[in-house]
Amino acid sequence: MNKSNCSVKMQSKTMKQPKISIIVPVYNVEKYLDRCMQSLLGQTLKEIEIILVNDGSLDNCPALCDGYESFNNNLHWPNIKVIHKKNEGLGFARNSGLEVATGEYVAFLDSDDFVNVNMYERLYVKAKEKNMDIVYCNCNIYRDDKHIYPRKDVIKEVTFSGRKAVDEFLLDMVAPLPEYHHDVRYMMSVWHAVYRHSIFMKYGIRFVSEREFVSEDIIFNIDFLPRVERVCYLPDCLHYYVVNTNSLSHAYDDAKYQRMVSLSWAVKERLAKIYSEEKYRLHYLRYVFCFLRNTIKRMVLMKETNKKITETLDEEVYQELLSSYPYQRMDLKHGIVFFLLKHRCILLLRILLKYNK
């Protein structure tokens, strides 16, 4: 952590090691921060460390963070640390939190999300009970109090033990094989899990910048999971992922698109360093398919020209996918979309993707 770019406020407490350090990057979220913090301050697992990383917020978040830090004026849990730093993005904010984390396990929570009051107790107890390096849970997609949608990546508790099982889990997290009926089998986000802290320390694992690759979480998982031996996934929906209904994140943006292309190449490069091409290829190509389909859908909704869409389909990053992926093994819905992409049926793609959710 570059100390010239940040300051850390910590009260001195005579305490044993926290069971979990929860790192919360904060940037211009004064509207949501208290909901997030109340869900942490009410945790049934009391021996936690909350690390608020103010990433150069321009609103009232710096003062709010310092206000929460005042909870440290006694010897009771939770222990709260506040870091103020210049704005560098989510990944680097998490890295700043890792530099001061002292917990046995580490968790990450986005400051506009929130969690069940027993989430971290459930994850920690399972981690200790089964000696897990990582424990995940399912999440809820939250639009408002009347629109909460449980997401069930797993419907019963699953354990992945040993290198072969964890490797298969990681590859399915990148993207499932053609036969799988959903695009996502296991969410690659880091905010619904706890991670053994000693693995960060032993291997020096840190987050890349999302300003370079758009999504830092998939790169993190490819770096982290090959270092672990035991992973558990719980069916409980304990995390609330808040969807901003006014967000522009689903609109087509050329600069963001180019970072997504860079991410695709980076994913392939990292996988190739770990696995044989035969082992990772179909998982990677399914990942590229999801990226391509979502890109074309955004272009359709933004009413991009047929020429622009065709030029996108002709880009190098998609050629292996379109020329050799066994789309016949996909279910009908995905197979039809792939066929239309492969044969550049732009008009039919416009009709299908405009109304296909």
Image (cartoon, rainbow, N blue to C red):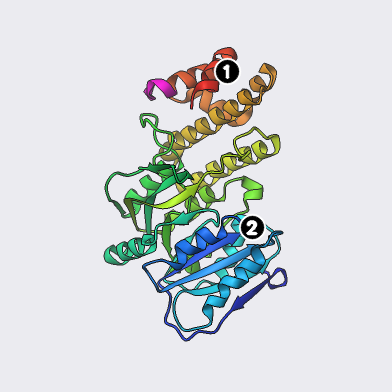
Side of 95 where 183 appears, left or right: left
Residue 90 visible in the picture:
yes
Q: Which residue is mark 2?
A: 27
Q: Amino acid at mark 2?
A: Tyr
Q: Whole-percent x and y of residue 308?
A: 69, 22
In front here: 285 or 112?
112
Q: Whole-percent x and y of residue 82?
A: 59, 71
Dot label at residue 40: none
Q: Whole-percent x and y of residue 45?
A: 37, 69
Quarter of the image for residue 2 reads bottom right
Q: For the point 48% across and 63% down, which residue is it?
A: 38
Q: Quadrant of the N terminus?
A: bottom right
Q: Which residue is mark 1?
A: 350
Q: Residues within 10 Å of mark 1 (few under 14, many from 20)?
A: some
Q: For the point 27% across and 65% down, which residue is it?
A: 129
Q: Is residue 329 above or below residue 29?
A: above
Side of 17 where 155 appears, left or right: left
Mark 1 or mark 2, earlier in chain = 2
| Residue lying furthest bottom | 14
Q: Is residue 331 magenta?
A: yes
